[in-house]
Amino acid sequence: MPISGVVIRCANGRSEELSRQVGAPGEIEVHGVLPDDRLVAVIEAASVDGEMRIVNRLLATDGVIDVQLAYHNFEDLPAGAANAPFPGKGEG
């Protein structure tokens, strides 16, 4: 099961609201709200594909500017399963 620590960058003044909105038991745990409108969170999923669906859902949330990967543990995945790209709005 992949587990990722992420930083969610929020629109100005929206971090408190989004910390309550994006938390989903068993998927997204918000562990902190930083003063510069960023959230510290952990994402858990059954697969990298599932994790990517969660990140894409976050990126589609009104007020979420970006999701930045800080830590990713996927040691129990089958060979080659961890090669999928991690999405982000800032790419390109």
Image (cartoon, rainbow, N blue to C red):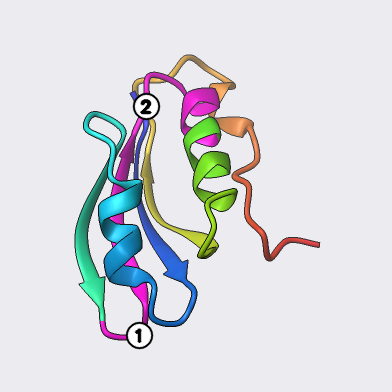
Left or right of 56 on screen, residue 76: left
Counting labels gives 2
**Residue 36's mark?**
1
Q: Residue at x 53, y 17 (%)?
A: 79
Question: Picture coordinates of residue 68 (x, y %)?
Answer: 49, 61
Q: Nearer the viewer, mark 1 or mark 2?
A: 1
Q: Secondary structure at mark 2?
A: loop
13 relative to 80, above or below: below
From the image, tell me which residue sits under label 2: 45
Left or right of 10 on screen, residue 89: right
Q: Nearer the viewer, residue 1 or 11?
A: 11
The three-letter code of the residue at mark 1 reads: Asp
Question: Picture coordinates of residue 41 (x, y %)?
Answer: 29, 54
Q: Residue at x 36, y 73 (%)?
A: 38
The three-letter code of the residue at mark 2 reads: Ala
Quarter of the figure with residue 31: bottom left
- Classify mark 2: residues with Cα within 10 Å, few (<14), some (14-19) or many (20+): some
15 relative to 35, above or below: above
**Start and end of the magenta stretch?**
35-52
